[in-house]
Image (cartoon, coloured by chain):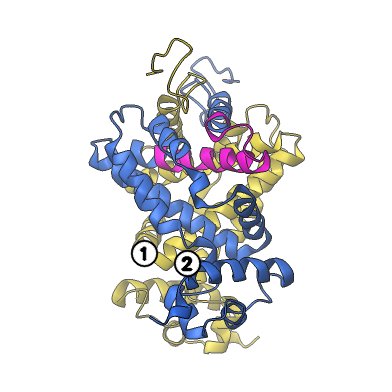
Chain colours: A blue, B yellow
Amino acid sequence: MPRWEHGSADRLKQAAMELFEEQGFDATSAVQIADRARVTTRTFFRYFPDKEEVLFADAEALNEALTQKLLQTPDVAKPLPAILRTLAGYDWASLGPLDVQRRRAALIASDPLLLERDLVKQQQLADGFRNALSRRGVDPEVAELAANTATQVFRIAYRQWLDGNGDPTLAAATDTAMSLLATIVPRTRRVANQRTALGKTDE
Amino acid sequence: MPRWEHGSADRLKQAAMELFEEQGFDATSAVQIADRARVTTRTFFRYFPDKEEVLFADAEALNEALTQKLLQTPDVAKPLPAILRTLAGYDWASLGPLDVQRRRAALIASDPLLLERDLVKQQQLADGFRNALSRRGVDPEVAELAANTATQVFRIAYRQWLDGNGDPTLAAATDTAMSLLATIVPRTRRVANQRTALGKTDE
């Protein structure tokens, strides 16, 4: 690999962020990103299948790391908190400065195609958690519901953490989001059937 | 519109299901679907932007109907049960015979592109609920968490209803899924911070 290609992926990521912010995601092409990063278009496509993917370059490694962490967690008897501890305990700052993560989040929110890609990545993460829980012996339906719900809860916590520039901490933001979930999940066993045996409504 | 085009959309839907099942989603083209439905390829694309969308033809109308129903529900003080009642109370049988809905679900599960499209549709439904709750004065974060969680819970209930061929009823399956969620959401306010003031773990 020629010397000028050293750090190409990082340069491509930075160039893409700049161009998306300057002229919008839609108006930016892979060719332009490659130009700004001083690599060939061919090099761009060696690293990324499309321009969306530049913003999700870390997703696979993150997914793998988090799934491994959940697989090794001592106790998954309470799978929802176990996943949230796994997520909140990860060193998210290692993904880059908070400011860059915030800019990335704003970019994703700005475009339907990026939101769609983000949704797919979130589901892949949830699927990783679900598989890890299943391998740990958790009932498949519990595993699915815990994995999907935990990623929804963490999504809110992560956004609050970014919006607050790191204060509250991610652990505290996760606690808050988890408490919010606890307040909206009813204790009653009947939600869809509105009537009790006495013909009264549940609520 | 020429007489032979009457019912084109329905014929296209049926032809697509047959071909997807016979030869797989990947191997089937819009041209083949149009041929089997005895319409031109141009007619296909007048009804559907791509072959994925044939399986989601009802999504927009469903979304609109459910969002309207939630907007008109008397009480949204408990938003999660309110959404689940809205979902469980809908006449899902109106979308077609249970057998056809089950075949459709199996097709979606068989292909990553269809799973992705399904994910997008589910999020659009959740976004509709979130907007409806916001318009009813529910706190934005509560609205988002309730909408996203409710659609996850209902997804499980709907699958059980299909798998059980209508028994349990959808209302009963929704109750069961909701109870499952209640069992995995901890009462404690601390999940991410593992230690209490005394240095003991929460669980």
Magenta segment = A146-172
- As drawn, is B15 to the left or to the right of A97? left
Q: Name the residue located 69 percent from the left edge and 76 percent from the top edge.
A: A27
Amino acid type of the residue tagged 1 in the rendering: Leu
Q: CA distance from mark 1 to mark 2?
A: 9 Å
Q: For residue B55, which numbered disc appears in the image?
A: 2
Q: Which mark is residue A131?
A: none
Give the chain of mark 2.
B
Q: Are marks 1 and 2 in contact (CB under 8 Å)?
A: yes
For image coordinates 62% across by 54% down, the residue present is A100
Residue B165 shows in the view: no
Which residue carries the number 1 mark?
Answer: B107
Residue B38, above or below B202: below
Relative vertical location of residue A165 with respect to residue B28 in this rendering, above or below: above
Q: Position of residue A167 (x, y in %)?
A: 64, 34
Is residue A152 in the magenta section? yes
The quadrant where residue B135 appears: top right
Q: Looking at the picture, how far across and down is residue A59, in whole percent?
A: 45, 57
Q: What type of secondary structure mainly makes up the magenta span?
A: helix
